[in-house]
Amino acid sequence: MLESIRKRARTGKVTLDLPAGDLPTPFRGMPVIADAFRSANVAEECSRVCATEAIDPEKKTIDLGRCVFCGLCEEACDGEGIRFSQDPRLPCGKREHLVLGGREFPTVKAAPDLRSLLGRSLHLREVSAGGCNGCDLEAQALGNPIFDLQRFGIDFVASPRHADGLLVTGPVSKNMREALVKTYEAIAEPRIVIAIGACAASGGIFRGSYAVENGVGAVLPVALFIPGCPPHPLTLLYGILGFLGRSPEKNPRR
Amino acid sequence: MHCVHTFELGKSAPRTEEAFRAFLRETSGGNNRLLALFAEEYSSGRFLLHAVAGGSVPGRFVHACVETSPRSFRTFTDVCPGAHLFEREIYDLFGLVPEGHPELNPLRFHEGWPKRSFPLRSVGAPAPDARRGYRFLQVRGEGIHEVAVGPVHAGVIEPGHFRFSCAGETIQNLEIRLGYQHKGIESLFPGSPGMGRILLSESISGDTAVGHSTACARLLEAITGNPADPSAERWRAVALEIERISNHCGDLGGLSTDIGYLFGAAHFGRLRGAALNLLLKITGNRFGRGLNRIGGIGPRVPGIAQEELIAALGSLRAEVESVGATMLDAPSVVARMEGTGRLLSRTAATLQFVGMAARASGRDVDARRDFPSPAYVEAPPAKVLLDAGDVMARAGVRVMEMRASFDWLPGVLTGAIPPGTIATEGNAPAAGRRLIVSVEEGWRGEIVHAAIVDDESRITRFKVVDPSFRNWPGLLFAVQKNVISDFPVCNKSFNLSYSGADL
């Protein structure tokens, strides 16, 4: 008992203040598109190695709703067209807001009345629907002392009856479809759906399999997509806080 | 290589059913074990069953196949109990009925599926019998009641349905229905053996991205005749051990949560993150995605100098050892974990359980010894074996395995040469129709990948066996006669993957 108290005192505070800055190399965060990607045949080169067809060589765009952040495109073009930065902050919002290189979109925020309702207290029911468990693990990590989601008034709850919304991972396997819809229907309105990871946006690496629905959007109305494979816990934090209209820069501790 | 083997299928004619049965019976003895049993439709409407086994002689794989009728085959579960789940899987994917199987419930498919849909069976093949629905075992008796949990569980975890039959608080029987995470991953592998397959393998089970992608990379290297150099193999082993450490820390934190020991939950939750961040520095991703390429490792791996990594591992070790010792000495922890969820070594041997859970029940199986990959051939991490088989033993094995990994890692890292400096000679890939098997010890246990390739080296059938698939029944035996309130801690002590089992 004494030993555990001593250990607690020695460890001190471990919780990360926001904004946390860039992560160390070779972390693959926000992709940066260079001019070369828009000219020449660099986009073609990049798209050829992309296993999830995230890169459109015609429109010269990269769809973070499909991207699994493998970095193969960066290797193929030697970083001349696409380079992955160490920034964990990714564009989050509606499905089309995840496409980089085309039209610029403003940050998506919840409607003002929803923000005033959920902005300081958001309780989510998490449903894993056919993914690999990677996104679930990062959502779970939000609860540890490092990321400490609860300090923001956000938490995961066991029952959908206690929840304001759903956090969904995975491409939605056909076998989970019914359970996902029932969980959603058990939440009182107004309710929001947050879909995290490439699978939940598009089916990701599993897109086109006989057993999946190719994303949460095919089953439920999604208010917020957060890309990644899986998204870093900080990406999740920035995404959710941004949606609630809360700026981590202005209020780093809470 | 001791961890990969190629069988030329042209040279081994299918056996008779009796010979195949005898082959499977032999795999049930000692350290021999069935690594995979799977079906293949080798031409329209014609099916082969393949069995791969091994274990008693390091690096020795054996294979047998048998032709089966397009409707059914006689079950092999009676001579090889470890075959029972494989046979249910074959029924679901190919529509081949294992006649006489003791529990032929659907494994992959749920009520919403068409009754005659068998996804890996060609359309041209004659339609087999419609599949029957799922039937839970009914326990009858005075005061018996059922508790149904899931598929959506209380925590932030994967889905599965647990059906408890209890007398009072005591669990008489637990039945687990899985399949909710089934995403048809094996159907996405066939085709040319390219990088996309490695990305797929990283998503078989999110917490075992290094284990699965390493097994898959070596398999693809054997197909294409493009082996990794010794230094790349060292970095693979380093990442595997750090993956093991991160998950063991996470599980000790999870066990702490389930018994209300918040000290362990907070510290191990944090230390798991520290280990994941080491993987991030090596590979660019917290789960080690991006480590593997066909023929080696990614060009930006490792993103950290060896000396820096050795120092970071040293300070992580000091923390893990001190928190681990405090936890396992705490009377409140011992009281909840000792004697809880006992898995008998006899059960573990009969059902051929693998990995860390088997080693906590006295079963000496470890692919790092039985099918050693290059970095493990000479001196693998020290052997860890306990025989109590309870939750305490599964926690103890984790602490001891982390210690063995921490002991082993500096040796591998010291003097590790930069990747790609030693030229490895490509060897001409074998020709003809062949079966390639690749095994690696992930943190839960041995991972098996098998591929059948045609004359042009294209994958025609891909089989993945996650250790969870083989160990899920272990939980059923461990919880019998325990109180239902101890179920969470029993479950966490196995921490099996739903995604890896459902594929």
Image (cartoon, coloured by chain):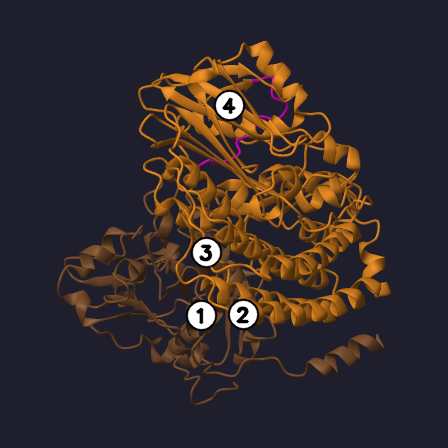
Chain colours: A brown, B orange
| Looking at the image, residue B503 lies above or below residue B420 | above
Compare residues B217 and B327 and report the one nearer the observer: B217
Q: Residues within 10 Å of mark 4 (few under 14, many from 20)?
A: some
Circles 2 and 4 on the same chain: no
Asked if badges 4 and 1 are on one and the same chain, I answer no
Using the numbered discs, state the Cα–Cα distance from disc 3 to disc 2 in whole angstroms.
24 Å
Q: Chain of mark 3?
A: B
Q: What's the amino acid at mark 2? A: Leu
CA gap between label 3 and label 1 equals 23 Å
Image quarter (top left, top right, bottom left or bottom right) of the N terminus of chain A:
bottom right
Other-residue count near label 1 (Cα within 10 Å), few / some / many at <14 / 14–19 / ≥20 = many
Mark 4 or mark 1, whichever is nearer to me: 4
Chain to which the residue tagged by mark 1 belongs: A
Q: Amino acid at mark 3?
A: Leu
Which residue was labeled with disc 3? B291
The stretch in magenta equals B99-112
- Whole-angstrom CA distance, mark 2 to mark 4, is 44 Å
Marks 1 and 2 on same chain: yes
What amino acid does circle 4 point to? His
Q: Is B331 left or right of B88, judged from the image as shown?
A: right
| Rendered location of residue B32, percent (x, y) | 67, 29
Reading the image, the residue beneath label 2 is: A142
- Is A183 located above or below residue A140 in the figure? above
Residue, disc 1: A236
Instruction: Tell me whether the residue at label 1 lies in contact with that at label 2, contact meaning CB atoms closer than 8 angstroms.
Output: yes
Please report contact status of discs 3 and 1: CB closer than 8 Å, yes or no: no
Q: Secondary structure at mark 3?
A: loop
Q: Residue B475: x, y in percent?
A: 69, 42
**Magenta-span inclusion, residue B101:** yes
Who's the residue at 58% across and 39% down the image? B469
Closest to the camera, between mark 2 and mark 4, is 4
